[in-house]
Amino acid sequence: MQTMEQLLDVLCRAGFSDEDVADAAFVFNTFVIGFVLDETQAIRHPGASHEEFAEQVRQWFRALPPERFPRLVALTDRLFDPDPNRRFEFGLKMLLDGLELRPRRPG
């Protein structure tokens, strides 16, 4: 709860409307939870480490028919980027960049 309070406080002090503050907090929370769920997929598949599970899914993507899914097949290695920190920072930066474009209260 303390983290959520801090986020709401930062957004309020930055001059965003109450509606934008609430919506932004929801989006940030959803992003973080979704990221954690994606990162913990292997836990829900007993008998496979995170790396083993990721490799199984990667192989499944590679086996898709390329004539039907050319982008999925071509981008498989990029879609399963082994650096979750880089991907998390990228997503967070995208959210912050979008928030920067929102109008704020003067002052």
Image (spheres, helix red, strand yellow):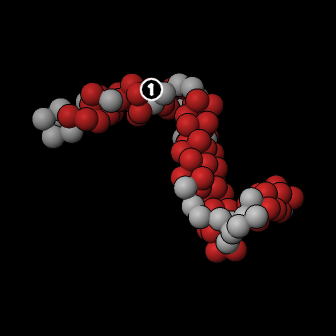
Instruction: Give the camera-side residue of 58 and 78.
Output: 78
Residue type marked 1:
Glu
Q: In this view, does 39 lie to the left or right of 8?
A: left
Residue 83: percent from the left, percent from the top? 57, 26
Quadrant where the N terminus sits is bottom right
Q: In this view, does 85 lie to the left or right of 55?
A: right
Query: From this viewpoint, is residue 48 visible?
Result: yes
Q: Is mark 1 on a helix, strand or loop?
A: helix
Q: In this view, does 107 lie to the left or right of 50?
A: right
Q: Which residue does the image show at 79% across and 62% down from the upper left?
A: 13
Q: Residue under label 1, please give it.
A: 55
Mark 1 surroundings within 10 Å by alpha-carbon count, few (fewer than 14), some (14 through 19), many (20 or more): some
Residue 75: percent from the left, percent from the top? 33, 29
Q: Which residue does the image show at 58% across and 29% down from the upper left?
A: 86
Residue 26: percent from the left, percent from the top? 63, 64
Query: From this viewpoint, is residue 46 visible?
Result: no
Residue 85: percent from the left, percent from the top? 63, 31
